[in-house]
Image (spheres, helix red, strand yellow):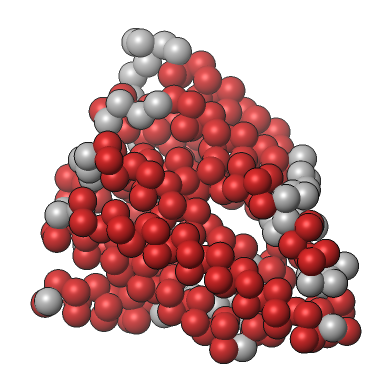
Amino acid sequence: MKTEKDIFRKGSTTYYFSSIFFPKKIKDDVFRLYSFVRIADDYVDVVPANKKAFLGLRKRWESAIKDPKFDTSTTDEDSIDERVIKNIVFVARKYDFDNAWVESFLDAMQADLDKRTYKTMKDTIWYMYGSAEVIGLMMAKIMGLPDKSLEYAKMQGRSMQYINFIRDIQEDNDLGRSYFPQDELKKFGLKNLSKKSTQENPQAFALFMSAQLDHYDTWQNEADKGMQYIPKRLRVPLQTAVDMYNWTAESIRSNPEIVFTMKVKPKKRHVIWKAGTLILQ
C-alpha cells in the first residue's frame, strides 16, 4: 500500500521536498491533502485518461462528505481511493474547509477530461481557481493563518499554476491541452503552441513567453505580500517552494525554447539546500 508520503513524493519534487520542512503535525495533514489531489490528478493525466476512476473518486467524495458518520480512520485494507477519500474528509472536517473548494478542484480536473478550451484570461483563471487557488486556501487553513491571508494564498496558487502551464507546454501538447487564453495566442500571432508553429515564428513565441512570465511575476509579487501572515517556522517550506518556482521562471525566461526539450524543475539537492539556507537566516 502506498503511503501519503509515497503519493506526494511521486507527484512533485518541489512541493514534496519543500513540505518536509513543516512541523510534523502540519506535515502529516499536508500529505493527507496532497494524497487526494495527486490521485485525482493522476487519473486525469494518465494516457488514456481514466475517466471511470476519476468519476468514481468524485462520487465517493460527494457521498462521504454528506455522511456525518463517515469514518476517516485508515487501515491497511483500504484501497487507494478509500484511503485518499478518508484523508480529504479528515482534513476538510478538521480545518473546516468550505466543501465548495473541493468541488471546484474536482470541476477543474473534470475540465481536463472534457478537453475544455480557454478563450480568455477569465476562463483560464476559472481553471486556476479550481486546480490551484483552492489548494492555497486549504493550505492556509492547515497552517492556521488568519482570514486576511486568504486572498494572498489564492494568488500563490495561481502564480505557481501558471508557471506549471509555461513549464509543461510540450507535455500539455502531448495531452491535447492548452490552458493559455486563445486571445493571448492570437494577440501574438500564434496559431497554437506546437513546436512546429513556434519555430515558424520564433520572435512571436519569445514575446508570448515573456508576457506569460510577466503575468506570473505580477501574481507572485502580490502573493509575496501574504508572507507577513506566516510564522517564520512555517514560512521556510513555502518560501523554498516560491524560490524554486522563481528559479524555474528565470530559467525559462533566459531560454524559452527549453520547454520543448525538457521539463524545467530544480533538483532535490537544490530544494533542500535552499530550505537549509532559509532555516539558518
Can the viewer see residue 126 in this picture?
yes
Q: Is residue 224 above or below residue 42?
A: below
User: x%, y% of residue 132?
Assistant: 49, 48
Identify which residue is drawn at 44% across, 25% down.
99
Q: Is residue 87 above or below residue 122?
A: above
Please state, as top left, top right, bottom left or bottom right, where the C terminus lies in the image: bottom left
Tell whether 152 sits left or right of 24: right
Identify which residue is drawn at 27% across, 40% down.
148
Tell whether 35 sits left or right of 55: left
Please state, as top left, top right, bottom left or bottom right, where the N terminus lies in the image: top left
User: x%, y% of residue 65?
Assistant: 43, 19
Tell whether 40 sits left or right of 226: right
Which residue is the extreme one toward the left?
280
The quadrant where residue 40 appears: top right
User: x%, y% of residue 231?
Assistant: 15, 54
User: x%, y% of residue 251?
Assistant: 52, 84
Identify which residue is drawn at 65% across, 46% down.
122
Identify which residue is drawn at 36% across, 50% down.
152
